[in-house]
């Protein structure tokens, strides 16, 4: 479905991704884990066409994404929840959700998708009229994910959804990620929280300073001795 092939990119003279390849198959949750500065967000921004790549290819259902502009990406049913969430603070929860269904193909189902999103996140249903900026960090993350679902994505890309959240909220967010995948949405999950990310994923990739150093089934990566030493200090 999504195939990242030998992607190299950077900013100015600084190379931040070197020959990165990864795949997300239909129905999978794939984790891309790595420390701060490894290049995770840069890869997501390349997929969403927010950054150019130097070489390689980005294939989506057989189409070359590098030929598209950023505004065309949602039309391909790829939804990207950026690091830091990107919700509109001065608008209500309800308006943020409806803004998520701006692309014409998603409009006929907007009421249905709205109710589906609220079923996943009951806390938002209680706060529809509240200004998004006054929600807690966890609620804002949930709103950002709910809004992304309004385009009925085939692929949901989440950039560090657990960052800065209290542990109990992190649990809720990962539970919902699992539930969204069960409903048929493929997920590319970017995380520094390797343990939690691998728990909800089918497969995973470990990115270190722009290079994929390990890949495999999530359960195998989670029990890998090198990973446990490097990332968990075990
Ligand atoms: N717009 C930018 N201009 C210059 N350097 C950048 C820019 N964005 C990210 N970088 C650099 O690219 C590297 C990878 O960053 P990033 O993709 O954000 O990593 P991660 O998401 O894994 O923390 C870092 O060294 C970062 O400083
Ligand atoms: Mg990042």
Image (spheres, helix red, strand yellow):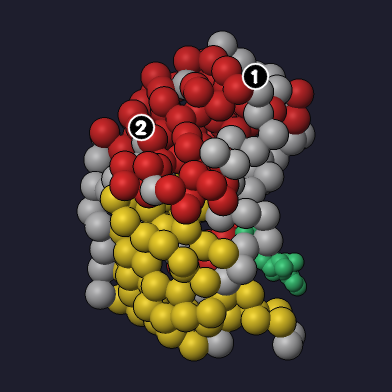
Query: What secondary structure is marked by label 2?
Result: helix
Instruction: Kindly indicate the quadrant of the structure image that contains residue 200.
Output: top left
Q: Quadrant of the N terminus?
A: bottom left
In the image, residue 87 sits, relative to residue 33, either above or below, namely: above
- Would you say residue 76 is visible in this rendering? no
Asked whether 100 or 27 is in front, the reply is 27
| Location of residue 214 (image quadrant) | bottom left
In primary-sequence order, the first of circles 2 and 1 is 1
Residue 30, x across and y down, in percent: 36, 51
Residue 178's label in the rendered image is: 2
- Pick the residue in front: 165 or 122: 165
Residue at image x 63%, y 49%? 83
**Mark 1 — residue?**
129
At which x and y percent is residue 221? 37, 49
Please identify the quadrant where the C terminus is shown.
Answer: top right
Residue 91 in the figure: left or right of residue 159: right
Q: Disc 1 beta carbon < 8 A from ligand 2?
A: no
| Residue at mark 2 to residue at mark 1: CA–CA distance | 27 Å
Disc on res. 146 = none
- x and y, in percent, of residue 225 in the image: 43, 48
Q: Residue at x 54, y 15 (%)?
A: 123
Displayed quadrant of residue 168? top right
Q: Nearer the viewer, residue 153 or 193?
A: 193
């Amino acid at each position: 479905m999504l195939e990242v092939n030998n992607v190299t990119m950077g900013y100015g003279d600084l190379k931040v991704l070197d020959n990165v390849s990864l795949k997300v198959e239909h129905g999978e949750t794939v984790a891309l884990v790595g420390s701060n500065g490894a290049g995770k967000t840069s890869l997501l921004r390349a997929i969403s066409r927010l950054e150019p790549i130097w070489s390689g290819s980005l294939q989506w259902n057989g189409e070359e994404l590098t030929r598209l502009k950023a505004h065309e990406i949602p039309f391909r049913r790829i939804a990207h929840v950026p690091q830091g969430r990107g919700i509109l603070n001065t608008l209500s929860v309800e308006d943020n959700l409806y803004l998520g269904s701006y692309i014409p193909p998603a409009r006929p189902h907007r009421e249905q998708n709205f109710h589906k999103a609220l079923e996943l996140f009951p806390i938002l249903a209680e706060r529809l009229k509240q200004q998004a900026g006054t929600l807690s960090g966890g609620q804002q993350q949930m709103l950002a994910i709910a809004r992304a679902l309004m385009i009925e994505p085939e692929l949901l890309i989440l950039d560090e959804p657990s960052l800065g959240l209290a542990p109990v909220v992190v649990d809720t967010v990962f539970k919902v990620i699992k539930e969204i995948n069960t409903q048929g949405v493929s997920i590319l999950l970017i995380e520094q929280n390797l343990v939690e990310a691998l728990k909800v994923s089918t497969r995973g990739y470990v990115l270190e300073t722009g290079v994929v150093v390990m890949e495999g089934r999530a359960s195998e990566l989670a029990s890998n001795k090198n990973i446990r030493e490097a990332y968990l200090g075990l």
